[in-house]
Amino acid sequence: MAFLPRASSGLRASIPMFRQARMMSSGEPGSGAGKGGGGGGSIREAGGSFGKMEFAHEEQYFRKLQSEQLAKLRTHLDEEVSHHEHEIARHQEAINRHKGRIDKLKEQQKKQQE
């Protein structure tokens, strides 16, 4: 079985990647109930320009929400990258420090053998 890294459950729940837009059978969103098999609230059920306006407001809300979620994700990932870069630098310093200690031990060993 292949190992797949798991994303945090909070991240998956908070960021919808794809969103489906429902269309009424008449082909026009917000055109009224009964034509596509669903209501959508009293304003949208009435149809007409108020229903279309309500649909437009909903779409605008979800686009804004998705944009905010993507911005948060981008910020979070930037912070993660920065953190890991810092950790890499810290580990590289430790490697160099340990190599220096090994070199000193080799020098001491050579002096003892002479």
Image (spheres, rainbow, N blue to C red):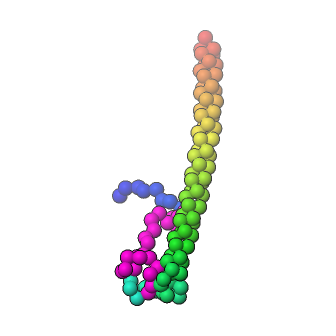
Residue extending farthest to the front is: 49
Residue 54 visible: yes
In the rendered image, the quadrant that contains the N terminus is bottom left
- Residue range highlighted in magenta: 9-33
**In screen coordinates, is 39 left or right of 73?**
left
Tell me the chief SS of the magenta region.
Answer: loop
Question: Compared with residue 82, is residue 5 higher up or lower down, i.e. above or below?
Answer: below
Question: Compared with residue 95, is residue 60 higher up or lower down, i.e. above or below?
Answer: below
Name the residue located 47 percent from the left edge and 84 percent from the top edge: 47
Question: Compared with residue 3, is residue 47 higher up or lower down, i.e. above or below?
Answer: below
Residue 11 located within the stretch drawn in magenta: yes
**Horizontal and vertical percent for residue 44?**
50, 83
Front in this rendered view, residue 84 or 109: 84
Residue 40 located within the stretch drawn in magenta: no
Front in this rendered view, residue 72 or 95: 72
**Horizontal and vertical percent for residue 30?**
47, 79
Name the residue located 44 percent from the left edge and 76 percent from the top edge: 29
The tally of labels here is: 0
Front in this rendered view, residue 50 or 82: 50
Name the residue located 62 percent from the left edge and 46 percent from the top edge: 83
Asked where in the image residue 10 lies, by quadrant, the reply is bottom right
Question: Compared with residue 74, is residue 91 higher up or lower down, i.e. above or below?
Answer: above
